[in-house]
Image (cartoon, rainbow, N blue to C red):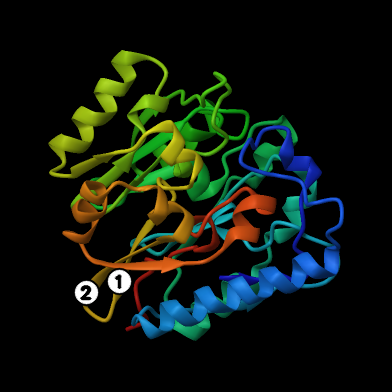
Amino acid sequence: MVRPACFGFNPQTAASNAFQRPPDPDSTASRAQALVLTEFDSVAQALRLAGVEVIVAADTPAPEKPDAIFPNNWVSFHHDGSVVLYPLSAPNRRPERREEVIEQAVCAGGFRVSRTVDLSYREAEGRYLEGTGSLVLDRAAHIAYAGLSPRTDLEVLGEFAQRLDYELVTFEAEDETARLVYHTNVVMTVGERFAVVCGEAIAAPPNRAAVLAKLAAGGHEIVDISLRQMRAFAGNCLELAAQGRKMIVLSATAWGALEPSQRSALARHGGILRVEIPTIERQGGGGVRCMLAEIHLPKRG
């Protein structure tokens, strides 16, 4: 997790992120920053109390990085020791890629890195792939689900799949206005034995059927959510390891949007941790899953 120094509404990402909302006219940047730090610290504390190992890196004040709180878009960590760096569409997000953040995570956790796969050069081509925002990974089966959008380019997806040995399942996801959904991880999440997915958002019926069939074939219990629930970040949850047991973290907004049967389905697969992040969701346009760059690196021997 990266504790933000200059959180705020980012106009460079707003054009493609329909989940973002500008601040109220009477709101100030300092007020938003204070609210977000309170929300951030509460999430980190709640995760630790639940038994999740949390490494918090500090953002730097300059240059200002309004979305630094979402590190999963620029880095991912893998079981084979790979660290992957990703191309970001907004120029003011690119300074978020900081080697010292990776070094802190690796050293603090006692992890081993065997290689770095740097895809960020694709920014010069105008092609983007924003980490585990663009990619929803079934890591055990090496399947990458990806909703194509201005931030999720098919050619870069192909390079990721080739270099990390992943099978791709691609589709286009649309909201109520037929606008492409900016990131796959608001449409769906994949846990070890469950998947939350907004089938209604997957525009083409054959693609929708293919996604649901692939998830079912992998033994996942599917929790199908509506477009309204997707808008409330119900698809933006994450399964974590918590001292030998599974923990599913999601926002209070997301939990409140779920029906009792959907809540019960999730609870069959782990403990439920609900966190309050209304400012982050509204102004940042991302949920709790976006705040977490989960680390799957091997430990040093």
Q: How many marks?
A: 2
- For label 2, count other residues whose C-alpha is less than 10 Å away and answer few (under 14), some (14-19) or many (20+): few
Q: From where the camera sits, is residue 192 visible?
A: no
Amino acid at the residue labelled 1: Ala
Does residue 103 lie above or below 22 as drawn? Answer: below
Given contact means CB atoms under 8 Å apart, are the residues at marks 2 and 1 in contact? Answer: yes
Q: Position of residue 7 (x, y in %)?
A: 75, 63
Residue 270: image location, x then y, percent: 22, 65
Residue 284, compared with residue 179, is above or below; it is below
Whole-angstrom CA distance, mark 2 to mark 1, is: 6 Å
Of residue 167 and residue 194, the one placed in the foreground of this image is 194
* Residue 236 place in picture, x, y as percent: 44, 50
Residue plotted at (31% across, 22% down): 208
Q: In the rendered view, would you say 76 is above or below 219?
A: below
Please state which of residues 237 and 259 is positioned toward the viewer in this rendering.
259
Label 2 belongs to which residue?
245
Classify mark 2: helix, strand or loop: strand
| Residue drawn at point x = 65 percent, y = 32 percent | 127
Instruction: Please state which amino acid type lies under the numbered disc 2.
Output: Arg
Residue pictured at 46% horizontal, 26% vertical: 173
**Which residue carries the number 1 mark?**
241
Residue 82 visible in this rendered orientation of the protein = yes
Rate crowding at label 1 as few (under 14), some (14 to 19) or many (20 or more) other CA atoms within 10 Å. Answer: some
Q: Is residue 290 above or below residue 105?
A: above
